[in-house]
Image (cartoon, rainbow, N blue to C red):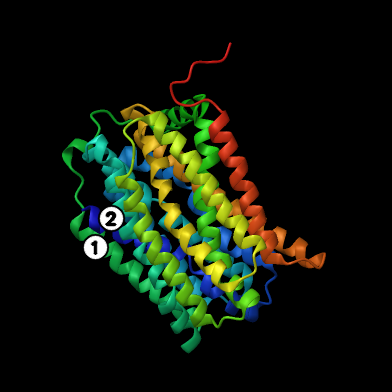
Amino acid sequence: MVLALCAGVALSQAFRTVGAIMASPLQAEFGLSPQALGIFSGAFHFAFGAMQLFMGIGIDLHGVRRTVLVAFPVAIAGALLSALSSNYLVLVLAQALIGVGCAPAFLVCTVFIARHFPAERFATVSGLVLAIGGLGMLVTGTPLAWLVQAHSWRAGFVLLALAAALAWLAIWHWVREPAAAVPARRESVPEAIRQFGALLMLRHTLGIVVLGGVTYAAFISLRGLWLGPLMIERHGFSLVQSGNVALAVSVISLVGAPLFGRLDSADPGARRRRIVLWALAYTGLFALIAFVHSAWLDIAGMLLIGLLSGFIVWQYADVRGAYPAALTGRAMAVFTMAMFMGVALMQWGTGVAASVAVAHGGDPLTAVLATIAVLLLAGIAAFAWLPAPGAKPRS
């Protein structure tokens, strides 16, 4: 059942990373500015993040299987609408529909794992799910670049729509909700919303949410949007060559999640300190790529970013341990919402930074990567200095 649910994660990963390969063809066809490109890519993540609370309620009230089966056809419709888009606004709407449809994809996996696996195996199994689901990013590397170059970007969306339909069929056929997952008493929707409010009011939630809003956003903004323009505009790579780099970054990121999952600490305090240290190293790599304009150093830096992005699985483990079991589903929903709203805001913000840099004669890609590094530093500071789970109020 976990493997079938991973099919949905894989398609979600594919949809959210198409921008890296499709950015240049879309700019050419629709005459998009960097800011418009950021809005295109951010539309998926904004819709994805905005729906997390509702998906969390759906999972708690109706279960994992029903929630994902109802939502995922919306992603298929969005992919087909993307392929048929005649203008930029329709394309953005289609991306938002894909985001809505993919919204429960990873959340259902984390809730399923939290409910049906021992707590000490949570980080390890979640890391494996991230790795398996990350196979979707491989499709949006060299294979998608070849397809787009040989045919068109529209063919890419058609292929993804067909793959999403197959993923839906796999979930429908294999996933069955265990009886233990059905609550003895179902909350009403207003009660569930009040529980979310109570969760957000806890003192340690803010630091978790702020860092969650930038770590994954940094990786996906690079891999899912700016990698292609970086290699094509800064270093003169072809679309397929850029796809090869994207493929390599995706492959190494598949190693990072299970590796960091196996290295997870059972001590929550030690885990939080490790998160801060690895996040600082991660930030340094973005700063390096921003200011060192060497093709091989940029590629090496992106490969290391792909590997280090695996530490994000520790953030999920931190959330798993920071809240009582009854709130696990909602806590995961809040954290996932923060992650993807963060992606949407970061992609929009980096698009603005690139446009401002162009207007003032600067390098737009330096502006993009430096902005990501600054946002990461702000998130790390919030996580380190705001109250931790179990911390006593300061007198």
Question: Where residue 111 appears, x then y in whole percent?
Answer: 31, 42
Quadrant location of the C terminus in the rendered image: top right
Query: Amino acid type of disc 1?
Result: Ala
Mark 1 sits on what residue? 170
Q: Are marks 2 and 1 in contact (CB under 8 Å)?
A: no
Q: Residue furthest top?
A: 395
Q: Residue at x 40, y 60 (%)?
A: 253
Q: Which residue is nearer to you in this view: 10 or 68?
A: 10
Question: Where residue 150 appears, x then y in whole percent?
Answer: 47, 89
Question: Where residue 83 appears, x then y in whole percent?
Answer: 49, 76
Could you tell whether 218 is left or right of 191 in the image?
Answer: right
Query: Within the image, what quadrant is residue 70 found in?
Result: bottom left
Q: Which residue is nearer to you in this view: 196 or 204?
A: 204
Q: Is residue 63 visible?
A: no
Q: Nearer the N terminus, badge 2 or badge 1?
A: 2
Alpha carbon separation for disc pair 2 and 1: 8 Å
Please give the label number shown on residue 5.
Answer: 2
Q: Which residue is nearer to you in this view: 132 or 93?
A: 132
Q: Nearer the viewer, mark 2 or mark 1?
A: 2
